[in-house]
Amino acid sequence: MFVTFFQELKSAGVPVTLREYLTLLEAMEQDLASRRVEDFYYLSRAALVKDERNLDKFDRVFGKVFQGMELLEQALAAEIPAEWLKKILEKNFSDEEKRLIEAMGGLDKLLETLRRRLAEQKGRHQGGSKWIGTAGTSPYGAYGYNPEGVRIGQDKNRNFRAVKVWDRREFRDLDDTVELGTRNIKLALRRLRKFARTGAPEELDLEGTIKETAHRGYLDLKLRPERHNAVKVLIFFDIGGSMDWHVQVTEELFSAARTEFKHMDYFYFHNCLYERVWKKNRRRHDDTTSTWQLLHTYPHDYKVIFVGDASMSPYEITTPGGSVEHFNEEAGAIWLERMTRTYSACVWLNPVPQEQWDYTYSIRMVRQLLGERMYPLTLEGLDRAMRELVR
C-alpha cells in the first residue's frame, strides 16, 4: 500500500524522492504515527511534501489511496473498535421500506440513546435496527438508512439525513484562480459597482497635464488616484458535504469576485452560520474567527453574500447543539438574524435549482430568515441579487 501511495504521488506531480520515502518508512518503524490514520497523514505530509503548493495534490492522493481507513476521533464517551467501521455491504431500501422507518423523536433523545448503546454494546454489529453498525436501519452507524441518524464511520453523504456526524471531515479551500467557464458571471457582478478615486496618486491625469502645461508654458505632469470599485463585499462560502456537488460554479463565482471587487473579504462555514467562521479549511478546527468579532470589525456598509445550498437538518438551524459537527450554544437562526440586522444589504445565492427549493424544508427556513432574499446561482439569479444589493 505504501508503494502504491508513493507511485500515486509521483503520478500526481508531487516531487517525492526515494530518500524521502525511506525516511517515511523509518518513521513508521519507530511508530511515530501511533497507528492512527490522522497521525500518519501529518507524518507522511511532513516527510514527503516540500512545497505548500503541492499540499492539495497530496490531500487528493492520500484520500484516494487510504479511502475508507479513517478512524473515529476520541470524542465519544465510549471507544468504538475500528473494525466495526469497515464497510461490508451497502444496503439499498425501496421507497416503501423507507416510509416504514420512523424517526427517533428529537435530537436530544437521539444522542442520549447513542450514549446508552455505546455503553451497552460489546461486539461488532452488521444490519439490523438497533445496534451501532453497518448496513442497517438503526439511527447509528454507516451505510444504512434512517431519516434522523447519527453517522459514524462512513465516507461522504448518501441520503443527506444525518443530524450528527461523528467523523472529522477535511474540506479543501476554493481555488480563486480557476479559469472561468463564462465571462457572464463577471458581467453580472458588475452591477454592484460604485467607482471612486482613492489612495495614492499613481495614474497619469492626461486632461489635467494638458491644462497645466498650457497654463504654465512647460510640461507639468499631473497624477491622480486610480479609479476603483469602492463597493465593499463580504462573502461567506458554505464548504463540504452536499456543496461538493457545486464546487465548480462556486469557484467560478469566487474567482470572478476576487477580480471584480477591490474591497472584498471572505470566510467559510459549514451548512449554517454559527459562532465562528474560518479562512483556511485545513485549519478550520484551530484557526477560526469569532462571528461576534466579525460583526464588530466590518462596517455596516459592507454588502454581504452567502453562497450555499442551505440543505441540512432543520435542527442545525433551530436548535442549540444542532450543528452536525460541534455543539453550538446558540441556534444557527440566531446568528443569521444577527447578520441580517447588522448588514441591511444581504443576499443568499443557492446553487440548487430554484424549482427544487420547496422540496427541502431547510431551504425554505433559510429563505425566510433572509427575508426572501435568496436567489439561484445562475446568471439571471446573480443579476437579481446584485440589483437587490444596490437598492
Image (tube, rainbow, N blue to C red):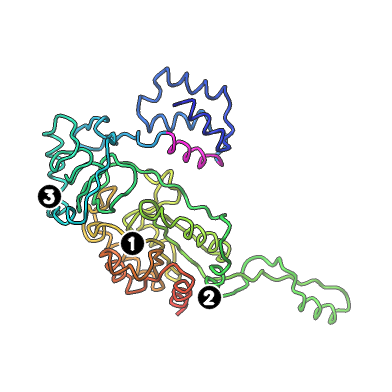
Q: Kindly state the secondary structure of the residue where label 1 is placed.
A: loop
The amino acid on which the numbered mark 3 sits, given as a three-letter code, is Lys
Q: Is residue 346 left or right of residue 253?
A: left
CA gap, disc 1 to disc 2?
Answer: 25 Å
Residue 175: x and y, percent?
Answer: 52, 52
Q: Kindly state the secondary structure of the residue where label 3 is placed.
A: helix
Task: Tell me, yes or no, whether the highlighted magenta stretch contains residue 61.
Answer: yes
Q: Residue at x 21, y 31 (%)?
A: 79
- Which of 157 and 373 lies nearest the eye of the viewer? 157
Label 1 packing within 10 angstroms: few (<14), some (14-19), many (20+): many
Label 2 packing within 10 angstroms: few (<14), some (14-19), many (20+): some
Task: Tell me, yes or no, whether the highlighted magenta stretch contains residue 342.
Answer: no
- Disc 3, disc 2: CB below 8 Å? no
Quadrant containing the C terminus is bottom left
Q: Residue at x 31, y 66 (%)?
A: 338
> Which residue is label 3 attached to?
109
The amino acid on which the numbered mark 2 sits, given as a three-letter code, is Arg
- Earlier along the polypeptide chain: callout 3 or callout 2? 3
Residue 233: x and y, percent?
Answer: 48, 66
Q: Which mark is residue 191?
A: 2
Residue 87: x and y, percent?
Answer: 29, 36
CA gap, disc 3 to disc 2?
Answer: 49 Å
Q: Is residue 245 left or right of residue 82?
A: right
Q: Is residue 251 above or below residue 386?
A: above
Query: Range of the magenta residues?
Result: 53-65
Q: Quadrant of residue 234?
A: bottom left
Judged by its main secondary structure, the magenta piece is helix
Q: Is residue 117 left or right of residue 241?
A: left
Q: Quadrant of residue 40?
A: top left
> Which residue is label 1 attached to?
310
- Which of 206 and 160 lies nearest the eye of the viewer? 160
The amino acid on which the numbered mark 1 sits, given as a three-letter code, is Ala
